[in-house]
Amino acid sequence: FDGMGNLLSFLDRVDVWTMLKGFEGEKQALALASRLEGPAFENYRRLPTNEKKKYESIQESLKREFMLGGTDRMQAVTELRRRKWRRGEEPVAAFAYDISRLVLLSYPDFDDDAAGVCKRDAFLEGLPSDFQV
């Protein structure tokens, strides 16, 4: 999991996998951490050492950072609207990643095609006019 996509689905799959392997406690926490990439792994790295050993602590930290949808869906939509423009010298790739993340959080029920259209439109609208064709 890299911070994109459905966090709850990912956590359910990890639960099943760790149960099948018989992992508990610190071993279960390490198994979850080993499945994280990019921003999600950075979230794990920021945890205090003692919290890194607790499966539930890792899950809660991931939920706080990567799960807006549901009752907080409007927060994601509002952030997407505010985030509309690329910030100063922000790398284009970072802007694209942020737009993609916010679209997925704002509209978790959209299929890949619909989400792709939203991502593309939000990305293009946020570029300076000299980037647009």
Image: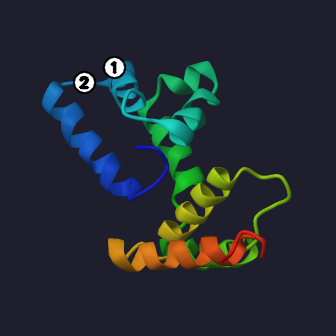
Q: Position of residue 54 (x, y in %)?
A: 46, 28
CB contact under 8 Å: marks 2 and 1:
yes
Answer with left or right where residue 64 lies relative to residue 55: right
Using the image, determine if residue 56 lies above or below residue 133.
above
Q: Amino acid at mark 2?
A: Phe
Neighbour class for label 1 at 10 Å: few (<14), some, many (≥20)?
Answer: some
* Numbered badge on residue 23: 2
Give the quadrant of the C terminus: bottom right
Work out whether residue 75 can be spotted: no
**Residue, x 54% and y 54% (percent of image)?**
66
Using the image, determine if residue 102 lies above or below residue 39.
below
| Closest to the observer, 32 or 22 | 32
Answer with left or right where residue 50 lies relative to residue 8: right
**Residue, x 20% and y 36% (percent of image)?**
17
Neighbour class for label 2 at 10 Å: few (<14), some, many (≥20)?
Answer: some
Task: Give the spatial CA distance, label 2 vs label 1.
Answer: 6 Å
Q: Position of residue 108 (x, y in %)?
A: 42, 72
Q: Position of residue 101 (x, y in %)?
A: 54, 61
Give the structural element (helix, strand or loop) at label 2.
Answer: loop
* Numbered badge on residue 27: 1
* Numbered badge on residue 42: none
Q: Which of the 4 image quarters holds residue 98? A: bottom right
Q: Which of the 4 image quarters holds residue 128? A: bottom right
**Residue, x 51% and y 52% (percent of image)?**
63
Give the quadrant of the N terminus: top left
